Image (tube, rainbow, N blue to C red):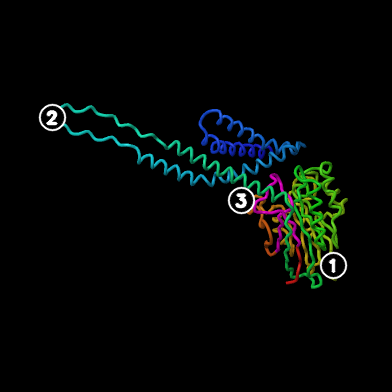
Amino acid sequence: MATFVGFAVLVTALIHLYLWKRLVRDTTDPGRWRKVGGIAALVLALLVPATMVGTRGGAYWLAWPGYLWLALMFYLLVLLLVLEVPMAVGKLVLRRRAMVAEPTAAAPEPALVGAAGPADPPAVAAVDQPDHDPARRLLLARGAAIFAGLTAAGITGYGVRTATGPPRLDRVRIPLAKLPPGMDGLRIATVSDIHLGPLRGRAHTERIVEMINRLDADLVAVVGDLVDGSVAELGEAAAPLRGLRSRHGSFFVTGNHEYYSGVEEWVQEVDRLGLRVLQNQRQEIHARGGVLDLAGVNDVTAAGTGLAAPADYAAALGDRDPSLPVVLLAHQPVAAHEAAKFGVDLQLSGHTHGGQMVPFNYLVKLQQPVVSGLGEVDGTKVYVTNGAGFWGPPVRVGAAPQITLVELCTP
């Protein structure tokens, strides 16, 4: 943990050093404004770790300024890195123009030895033309800084509006070969990554519950990362979950953030609110004259924490009737590699936030087999919902918050 924190601090320092160079040093002359910019860069660099530590210690007032700057910092970094190529080309063009414009000294006239004549006029020193290159470089740097600043601010503002707005409701039909004909059309309201915490409270939960209840679903699946804090801090914010309605019950599996927030207390609290917590368990769902196995496993983060049993696919999926269709609730899509070994027909997951902030979605692909929407892993269908909340910056770009109504159907 200490190694990770040290690495994060080092990366943060290097990013702010780069931003200071591009936004302050390259755009100002030595003097007061450069000093002011340097102080601002230092304060913002310290704000990032202060926010990470402070919000976990209850200093929630740091959350909005700290996490907003984190998002703005990220997009400034991305945009300035993209601008490095055109900036380098622009500097090269300016350098060549300066070389072409530079005057060359004229060669001296040859003199005849011993020839008499009027005295040669005194040589006139060539007057150097003023070098406009530094001024043009400064203009180029300022133009890039203004463009990056305005664009990053615009993207961040759009992302805040998207992240804090109502979740998008998506509907997806997924055919299952083993689904009994009578269960065709069975609907599962699926939500993940609600992330109650410093920036999201009871009103966020109430809105999600209201949206789910309007769907009149057969089942409700909450697939992890409900909270970023303890029951004492967020129990009241989670309380509206008690009002979830469905024909055959509401179910919950743990996400990685539950293991950072007191997983044992949260399992008890969620159960008290009326959701069945599937901890490496399954339950038969009898509906419309058919039977479906609904299973759930603990998040893969549980392994090694000592806080709860690790994900146990054999306990949840072993020794069951293979003729029945099975839907697995697992927070992380990567669980599908193990689930496929047990013939899971469909896995419902979250965790990725759909990438939350483009271009993070490309990095998520390095860890998770499916980032958003419907995919397939080793023969098992995997549906990943974007999540209804956010983590860290209250910003979503390219991955709107989402609640999904999954409708099972026969092929």
Q: Most prominent secondary structure in the magenta stretch?
A: loop
Question: Which of disc 2 and disc 1 is earlier in sequence?
Answer: 2
Measured in 3D between alpha carbons, the distance from the residue under mark 1 to the one under mark 3, in whole angstroms, is: 42 Å
Q: How many discs mark residues in the rendered view?
A: 3
Rendered position, 399 above or below 177: above
Q: Quadrant of the C terminus?
A: bottom right
Classify residue 199 by image quadrant.
top right
Select label 1 or label 2 by which is in front: 2
The numbered mark at residue 113 is 2
Magenta-tinted stretch: 380-405
Q: Residues within 10 Å of mark 3 (few under 14, many from 20)?
A: few
Q: Position of residue 17 (x, y in %)?
A: 57, 36
Rendered position, 392 above or below 20: below
Q: Residue at point 70% right, 56% down?
A: 333
Question: Which of disc 3 and disc 2 is earlier in sequence?
Answer: 2
Say what amino acid the circle numbered 3 marks. Pro
Does residue 264 appear anywhere in the picture? no
User: In the visual, does 374 lie left or right of 246?
Assistant: left
User: In the visual, does 87 lie left or right of 295?
Assistant: left
Q: Position of residue 396 (x, y in %)?
A: 67, 50
The numbered mark at residue 24 is none
Q: Residue at point 45% right, 42% down?
A: 91
Say what amino acid the circle numbered 2 marks. Val
Question: Which of disc 3 and disc 1 is earlier in sequence?
Answer: 1
Say what amino acid the circle numbered 1 marks. Ala
**Quick check: marks 1 and 2 in contact, CB under 8 Å?**
no
Pointer 3: what residue? 359
Pointer 1: what residue? 287
For label 3, the SS is loop
Select label 2 or label 3 by which is in front: 2
